[in-house]
Image (cartoon, grey):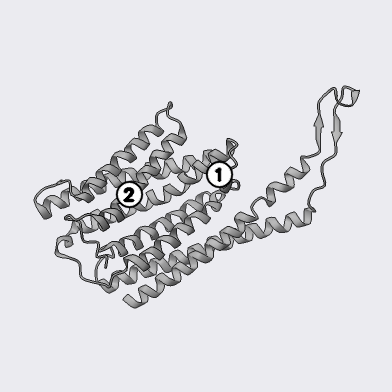
Amino acid sequence: MSALSDQLVTFAILAYLVAMICHAVEYALGNARAVAPAAAAKRELVGAGVGGAGGPVDVPAAPADPPARLGRSAQQARLAGRVAVWITALAAALHLAATVTRGIAADRMPWGNMYEFVLTVSWVSAAAWLAVLWKRPSLRRLGLFLTLVMVLLLAFAELKLYVEVVPLMPALQSAWYIVHVSTISFSSSIFLLGAVPAIAFLMRNGYERGRRSFPYTLAKRLPAADGLERLTFVLHAFSFPIFTFAVIAGAIWAEAAWGRPWGWDPKETWAFISWVVYAGYLHARATPSVKRNVATWIAILGFLTMLMNLFGVNFFFTGLHSYAGVS
């Protein structure tokens, strides 16, 4: 089962990569539908005073691309986008199978080390993305960035975090293991997903305000900034209570395992920092005087603290939570 899980992870990475390429094709052709109306609109009416007659004058437009060619480009873009979504769903299915077989091989829930945790968190993010896309198909172009994140996360997990299947260490053998780690995994996954539209919003917002330098030009074909910002808020508002419960459950578990609910262990400290930053984001988002781009930067800062808690603490600090199993 362990070998099967490893193979399935490899297939999932390849499937996410193919989906990313398909999304990139759609992204490259994504202005096709916008070009046709723009070409038609170039014949505009000019106000009174032009031509000396006081009435509107029809100004001929510059030659436009043939409609047939524009139609083919639009169809190719839509087809590439739909294929990308189906391949993403296939990749998520392979990803889930890899996680499940890893758990079967270990005879426990697959959250005992960093490799398994990243495997689980990234899958929940992918599944949540497909759920969002089912409700809001107009956000499909964000799939380019989501699949890129999936490829990078899984490749990093395979290359740097992978460890052989081992039994769960005694300190983790508790019912709170399932309660705490499942909720922290789920909330971390939604925060990961929320970081994608947050970054996209900052780029798109800058583009809509006239910035034409890198990286704002990458947002030329993204959905409108307002929609991206609302999605960012919805995802964070949904995840924050779950993350709060996960932190509380961790404190209860610490009391049962170590005789104290809180000891400012490095991972506990960074979990608290993340909680404060995300609470600050939601407060800023609810405050009318705070600009949306400022609040979004706070959300991105929160995600950076989550990354520090996941990777930095396990690599650079020693504490009671040092069970990452990184070889």
Q: Amino acid at mark 2?
A: Met
User: In which quadrant will I find the N terminus?
Assistant: bottom left
Closer to the observer: label 2 or label 1? 1
Direction from residue 125 to residue 117 in the image, left or right: left
In the picture of the structure, the residue carrying the numbered disc 1 is: 216
Q: Position of residue 206 (x, y in %)?
A: 54, 39
Alpha-carbon span between mark 2 and mark 1: 25 Å
- Could you say which is closer to the camera, residue 150 or residue 209? 209
187 to the left or right of 224: left
Q: Tell me where residue 170 appears, x and y as whole percent.
A: 14, 64
Q: Is residue 128 above or below residue 47?
A: below
| Res 232 visible | yes
Q: Residue at x 43, y 61 (%)?
A: 152
Q: Residue at x 24, y 67 (%)?
A: 108
Q: Residue at x 57, y 48 (%)?
A: 218
> Can you give x and y, in whole percent of width and height, for residue 166 in the image?
23, 71
Front-most of 270 and 222?
270
Q: Secondary structure at mark 2?
A: helix
Q: Residues within 10 Å of mark 1 (few under 14, many from 20)?
A: many
Query: Is 218 drawn above or below residue 85 in the view shown?
Result: above
How packed is label 2: few (under 14 Cα within 10 Å), some, or many (20 or more)? many
Q: Going by the image, does 260 lie left or right of 200?
A: left
Query: Does residue 185 sit above or below 41 in this rendering?
Result: below
Of helix, strand and loop, which one carries label 1?
A: helix
For the C terminus, the quadrant is bottom left
Judging by the rendered image, the residue that carries numbered circle 2 is 306
Inspect this view and state whether residue 1 appears: no
Name the mark on residue 318: none
Identify the amino acid type marked 1: Tyr
In the rendered view, tell whether residue 118 sits above or below residue 199: below
